Image (spheres, coloured by chain):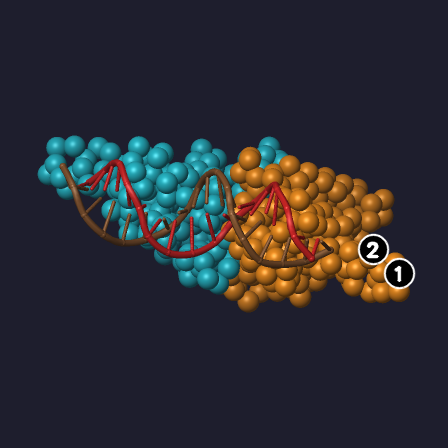
Chain colours: A orange, B cyan, C red, D brown
DNA sequence: GTCTATAAAGCGATAGAC
DNA sequence: GTCTATCGCTTTATAGAC
């Protein structure tokens, strides 16, 4: 869905784009497995059948490579754009669908789990990226839950803002347990159960 | 609470224990800040006013140091031992109290957030440790929620096993958002809200 | 029990050839 | 665009003095 299939255009430019996209896939998988601080440019380059200066030709620093991986992933992932302006339930179904989808994209789950935890350190290159990401996710979900509340579908005593923070937290925390294999629970099922405890008749 | 105050015993043995305990505190803080893979023995040793071979005298490898830090922390932390055999609510109050307590122990929160995410990689030295830890936590919490259910205090439609996994997930996920500072919500308050959505009259 | 010195390997990044 | 070679630095771990 994300790389290749650029054949038939200007050779040099098309080839350049394909290479870059391929490198981003490889780097994403590697960051996912050992985190950003645990990754080396040599290992990533070797995995893409390239020398590490070859890799650095496309991305000037290791940090630039990480940011490119994160930003590209966020564009592709629908999780962050749960259809604004619609009736809140659509956004929530979207988040649940994202949890199910993640079950067949282990690499993405590993990437965000490993790097988001690393990035809590203030000097981490992706620190600001994750602050923005969580704020945006929580804000959109709060908005969605407020709409659900306006329709009278929220259970009594549920505060939209607190529930939004917790819902994003469940999503995150589930990923660690799922990756470890300490539970065989489906992340999608668990997210549905979670929202069922917040919303009437789900 | 954890080191020092061993004065007045056998000098050599007492001093040795105090040094070791002090090194564990320092290492815990450092692992917390940059993760296991991002830490160096030199930095940890320097922080404890010691050379790195001095540190390696007490812990033969970096991996042994990490495992010692994790196991010691788990002993001290009450979170994992929420009073078995009592009426489920006590265990739940214990977990909420642990969330409040964590708010004044940022280093511990950072340690478990950074290392648990790293440890999802199968070759990580703490991989098995975290699988055991989560299984044990979820099992105990499931047991507690089953007791609450037996008292008829669980809201309709709440499954103890699924709710236990999610509750541990909320706890974990909250820590990342709290560490990033992307929310100013209290982790303890959020955990209380969470359980209130599962249990009647909380 | 702690040190200095050092080995052996790996790191990110650059220079310069092709 | 990609390579080899290399710089300067850091890593874990060990040897051996005190």
Q: Nearer the viewer, residue A1 or A50?
A: A50
Q: Residue at x 21, y 41 (%)?
A: B17
- Which residue is the site of mark 2? A13
Mark 1 and mark 2 in contact (Cβ < 8 Å)? yes
Mark 1 surroundings within 10 Å by alpha-carbon count, few (fewer than 14), some (14 through 19), many (20 or more):
few
Location of the N terminus of chain B (image quadrant):
top left
**Relative vertical location of residue A78 with respect to residue B106 in this rendering, above or below:** below
Subunit under mark 1:
A
Q: Position of residue A72 (x, y in %)?
A: 73, 51
**What's the CA distance linking mark 2 and mark 1?**
8 Å
The image's mark for residue A9 is 1
Subunit under mark 2:
A
Can I make out residue A145 in this image?
no
> Disc 1 on helix, strand or loop?
loop
Q: Position of residue A144 (x, y in %)?
A: 76, 45
Q: Quadrant of residue A45?
A: bottom right
Q: Quadrant of residue A156?
A: top right
Q: Residue at x 28, y 52 (%)?
A: B60
Q: Residue furthest left?
A: B10
**Relative vertical location of residue B11 with respect to residue A7 in this rendering, above or below:** above
Query: Does B84 sit left or right of A52 as displayed?
Result: left
């Amino acid at each position: 869905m994300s790389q290749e299939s650029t054949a038939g255009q200007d050779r040099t430019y098309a080839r350049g784009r394909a290479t870059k996209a391929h490198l981003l896939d490889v780097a994403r998988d590697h960051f996912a497995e050992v985190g950003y601080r645990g990754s080396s440019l040599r290992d990533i380059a070797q995995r893409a059948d390239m020398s590490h200066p070859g890799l650095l030709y496309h991305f000037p620093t290791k940090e630039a490579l990480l940011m490119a991986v994160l930003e590209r992933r966020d564009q592709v992932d629908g999780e962050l754009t749960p259809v604004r302006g619609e009736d809140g339930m659509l956004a929530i179904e979207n988040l649940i669908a994202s949890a199910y989808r993640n079950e067949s994209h282990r690499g993405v789950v590993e990437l965000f789990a490993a790097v988001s935890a690393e990035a809590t350190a203030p000097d981490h290159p992706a620190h600001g990226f994750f602050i923005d990401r969580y704020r945006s996710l929580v804000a959109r979900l709060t908005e969605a839950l407020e709409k659900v509340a306006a329709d009278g579908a929220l259970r009594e005593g549920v505060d939209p803002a607190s529930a939004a923070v917790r819902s994003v937290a469940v999503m995150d925390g589930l990923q660690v347990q799922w990756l470890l294999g300490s539970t065989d629970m489906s992340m999608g099922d668990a997210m549905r159960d979670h929202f069922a405890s917040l919303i009437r008749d789900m």
